[in-house]
Image: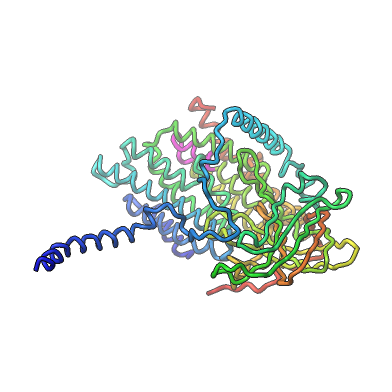
Amino acid sequence: FTTSLLLGTTMTISSNHWIMAWAGLEINTLAILPMISKSHHPRAIEAATKYFLTQATASALLLFSSMINAWQTGQWDITQLTNPTSCLILTSAIAMKLGLVPFHFWFPEVLQGTPLTTGLLLSTLMKFPPITLLYMTSPSLNPTVLTFMAILSTALGGWMGLNQTQIRKILAFSSISHLGWMTIIISYNPKLTLLNFYLYALMTTATFLTLNSTKTSKLSTLMTTWTKAPALNAALLLTLLSLAGLPPLTGFLPKWLIIQELTKQDMA
Amino acid sequence: MAVAVVLLSGAPFHGGCCRHKVFLSLLGPLLSNSKLYSSYRRPGAEPKKKLSWQNADFSFKKSIDHLKTQLSLLTKETQDYLQGPGGHPLSQHVLEQTRVLWQFRSQEDLNKWVISSDVEIGGKSKVYIKLGRNNQAALLYGTLNTEVPRDGETKYSGYCSMRSRPAVGSFNRKKYYDWSNFNSLYLRVRGDGRPWMVNIYTDPYFSHQKDDLYSYFMFTRGGPYWEEIKIPFSKFFFSSRGRVQDNQHPVWLDKASFLTLGLTIGDKVDGPFQLEIDFIGLLNDRAHREEFAYETYDKN
């Protein structure tokens, strides 16, 4: 399944044709489903079903968008998405794939039903192909729609994560919030989106792997990990602060650069 | 000859009629208003004369009052959200080891529970609930009767149960609680020696999981003294539609709405029963280290 995930991701990020990109996304979706439902617990099955339904809908919308563009312009090149309707449908499809507001409701529930390692893959590797498609089509997309979704994602990701007691749900809301930051800058400086994504993937990987090694899934367990692995706990503290974006840690860098770029665009 | 002509001329008509009947029989379930399951009405069930939407009350004043109630509930929920998880500060959530879920001190506490028995399938058991002496406990009492209703399809009878009403928030939305800090159910009861079954129904998202139930036994002593029964959640076994499943898994408590916590008696013994319940709560028993009491296995 891991090989299929890598295949799907590679297919999407290296494709020029919409059909290849869509095929890669479908391979990714199908490959991760058995990993989500591995434990056969009803909650895991629920998470897998919710993931499949949302991702299948998003893939269908993506294909629909590319078909409208092909019908209007006669070509299937990803970078040549020019039809406004196609761009709008693609934006909603990518938002659903990524978990941007208002298509974010599935993400915390799915992450809560999965084991921590699969959750890591859902938060990092599964986000890479849609971000790549967003990067390739960013000049054609409506900045207003993207900005609107990004601001809502950043705000709601933060507020809804406030009273959570399950760590996977907190990390899901953190992911939604970071995706908001990535989306807001994509129309003006797409390279900052990629920088933000790479750093976010690094920090999230560190967080998930630390939590996996201490078998922590809720806050009350996290409170007692300092007795079992004090050094790892201290490292987790720094990683979480970095995820939050505190200077002088690494996580502050993309936020600073994004705000600087938005200021240049008279938006901040 | 004339008869033969009539019969021959009638043949296509009959053929068409038969085709029409076959067509209707195929589309019958779609065209009829009956439910997907059998429309047979059990002897104890009331005949449904009115459709559910006909029972709706379209009074304007009542709807305004209802809206005011729901908005006040929403305001309270927002204030609780600002305070912390479950309306309590985070420190309380992290440090608490016990929590009382239901206690029986007034009629309002009794109204949070629903009692039922095999009368709904045509049986003859009786069950009642009232407040005990000095309003300090709930008294669940009645008579169990295992006589099978003679309707041709029921094989077993004789059960009585008490189930909690679902917790709903504003605008009838389901309330979800995080009870993952606790690992045991704690009941202070005074029984009559009869065994009970504790059922937990965690509200599933999909309809095909609506028959899932987690159960365990509660054996009571008959003495005059109260007993405190601790049932770890790791002991609850999983069943669906009354059949214990091969593929067992522990009950997840992180999204425990506990739509129904039920106490059922069905020990196949005719006669009176009585159970006094002081309170039902949750406990984090640090001495209990078991994760799950039954074998879990991977299919492949």
Spot occupied by residue B154 in the image (x, y as percentages of width and height): 58, 69
Viewer-side residue, B198 vs B128: B128
Q: How is the image coloured?
A: rainbow
- Residue occupying image coordinates x 81% and y 45%: B106
The quarter of the image holding the N terminus of chain B is: bottom left
The residue most toward the right is: B224
Viewer-side residue, B229 vs A157: B229
Q: Is residue B181 magenta?
A: no
Q: Quadrant of residue B125?
A: bottom right
Spot occupied by residue A55 in the image (x, y as percentages of width and height): 45, 52
Viewer-side residue, B127 vs B237: B127
- Residue occupying image coordinates x 90% and y 63%: B225
Decide: is A83 above or below B174.
above
- Residue occupying image coordinates x 63% and y 72%: B296
The residue stretch that appears in magenta: A179-192
Residue A153 located left or right of residue A214: left
Query: Can residue B289 be seen by looking at this rendering?
Result: no
Q: Is residue A180 magenta?
A: yes
Decide: is B106 above or below A120.
above
Residue A267 located left or right of residue B291: left
The residue most toward the front is: B2
The residue most toward the top is: A266
Spot occupied by residue A39 in the image (x, y as percentages of width and height): 58, 65
